[in-house]
Amino acid sequence: MERHFAATAYLVNSNKLIFIWHKKLNSWLPPGGHVEPKEAPHEAVIREIYEETGITDIIFFENKPLVKYDYRTKSLPEPYRILEETISEDHFHIDFIYFAETKQFPLETETKVIMVTKEELKILSPIFENVRILGLEALEKYEKRNVDTA
């Protein structure tokens, strides 16, 4: 069995989620991809967002503040979830799922990119059900976060 680490971001801009078209899977997905050997998961997702959308300015939805404990130990941005995803019979991803916000809009890239509202997400097709559920959760957290800080 082959396991790869991956990192994915449900990226929100003005109450809309940003999705990319995944050619191999023929489905709308949030930006993300494999974690490279020298990357932390949050670094991988920042890189993947840039490669797929051109966006460079993101803020993770933080549950806890980042802490530097001493000269050699610090906390990293925490994922919202960690999923095991079956890619094929003998290939799995351990996927670090982040919720993030951006004020930037996607730039022109080779990847097909869309932005969808909550209502559009409910009927978006084709999409995996876990992607729809997590997308709705990301939008709810985003809305609550903005109400709480208003």
Image: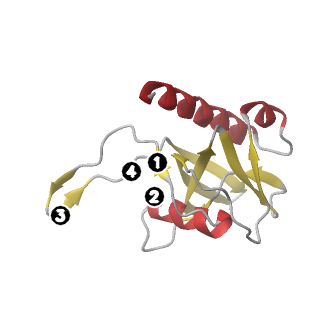
Q: Are marks 2 and 4 in contact (CB under 8 Å)?
A: yes
Residue lying furthest left in this view? Answer: 70
**Amino acid type at image mark 2:** His
User: Looking at the picture, does residue 13 appear above or below residue 63?
Assistant: below
Q: Would you name the residue on which mark 3 appears?
A: 72
* Quadrant of image for the N terminus: bottom right
* Mark 1 burial class by Cα count in 10 Å: few <14, some 14-19, many 20+: some
Kindly state the secondary structure of the residue where label 3 is placed: loop
Q: Would you name the residue on which mark 2 appears?
A: 42
Judging depth in this view, the residue of 5 and 86 nearest the camera is 5
Judging depth in this view, the residue of 29 and 145 nearest the camera is 145
Give the spatial CA distance, label 1 vs label 3. 23 Å
Kindly state the secondary structure of the residue where label 2 is placed: helix
Judging depth in this view, the residue of 74 and 1 nearest the camera is 74
Kindly state the secondary structure of the residue where label 4 is placed: loop
**Amino acid type at image mark 4:** Pro
Q: Is residue 62 left or right of residue 51?
A: left
